[in-house]
Image (spheres, rainbow, N blue to C red):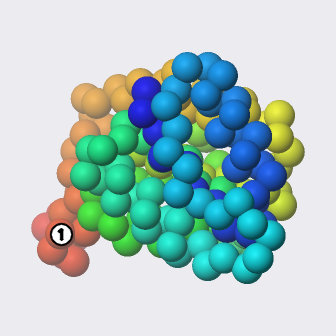
Amino acid sequence: MKLAIGNDHAAVEMKQEIQKYLEEKGHEVINIGTDSAERFDYPISGYKVAKLVSSGEVDGGVLICGTGVGISLAANKVKGIRACVCSEPYTAKLSKQHNNSNIIAFGARVIGIETAKMIVDEWLSAEYEGGRHQARIDMITEIEETQKLAAD
Ligand code: RB5
């Protein structure tokens, strides 16, 4: 797969390790995050990865900051993005199967590197199940596009 990865200063080492891990598994990984310990505002990485995903230039995105929260919040402001913060692999897998997540996020100050690897493995190997889940995804899209929900 072709993936984009982004991070802030809190997650440089984990980003580098995850990028290497994904490349060793045969994925192409575009690094748009920082590789410096200098303060780096996470919305920049969240936005850039989200745009690459929403435009279809990459198949998915991985975002890492201290907690995974700020960077995923920024990504979720881009239309069509479903970025999910996970601290364990079960949620990562279900976020793809049920929520069709197109970005996975986690926190370098929250989980260790082995859990991070398990999260990306589960997320990348899971498939969106569609079916009954699609109506809910459509409702999320409706909120995003109209700021309303007809079913409310
Ligand atoms: C940076 O100190 C920290 O706030 C950031 O990495 C992230 O955890 C924000 O959600």
Label 1 sits on a secondary structure element that is helix
State which quadrant residue 92 falls in. top right
Q: Which residue is mark 1?
A: 145
State which quadrant residue 24 falls in. top right
Residue 49 x, y percent position in the rendering: 45, 57
Which of 135/107 is in front?
107
Which of 103/37 is in front?
37
Q: Residue at x 71, y 60 (%)?
A: 35
Which of 15/63 is in front?
15
Name the amino acid, label 1.
Answer: Glu
Residue 73, can we see it? no
Residue 115 x, y percent position in the rendering: 79, 37
Q: Under 8 Å from ligand 1: the CB of mark 1?
A: no
Q: Quadrant of ligand 1?
A: bottom right
State which quadrant residue 108 falls in. bottom right
Q: Residue at x 76, y 76 (%)?
A: 38
The C terminus appears in which quarter of the rendering? bottom left
- Relative vertical location of residue 142 with respect to residue 113 in this rendering, above or below: below
Please state if 41 lies on the left or on the right of 142 as rendered. right
Which of 145/131 is in front?
145
Q: In the current view of this chain or complex, which residue is farthest to the front?
A: 36
Residue 32, can we see it? yes
Q: Residue at x 30, y 44 (%)?
A: 57
Q: Residue at x 37, y 29 (%)?
A: 128
**Mark 1 Cα-neighbour bin, 10 Å: few <14, some 14–19, many ≥20:** few
Please state if 1 lies on the left or on the right of 8 as rendered. left
- Relative vertical location of residue 101 with respect to residue 107 in this rendering, above or below: above
Residue 56 x, y percent position in the rendering: 27, 44
Residue 122 x, y percent position in the rendering: 60, 27
The N terminus appears in which quarter of the rendering? top left
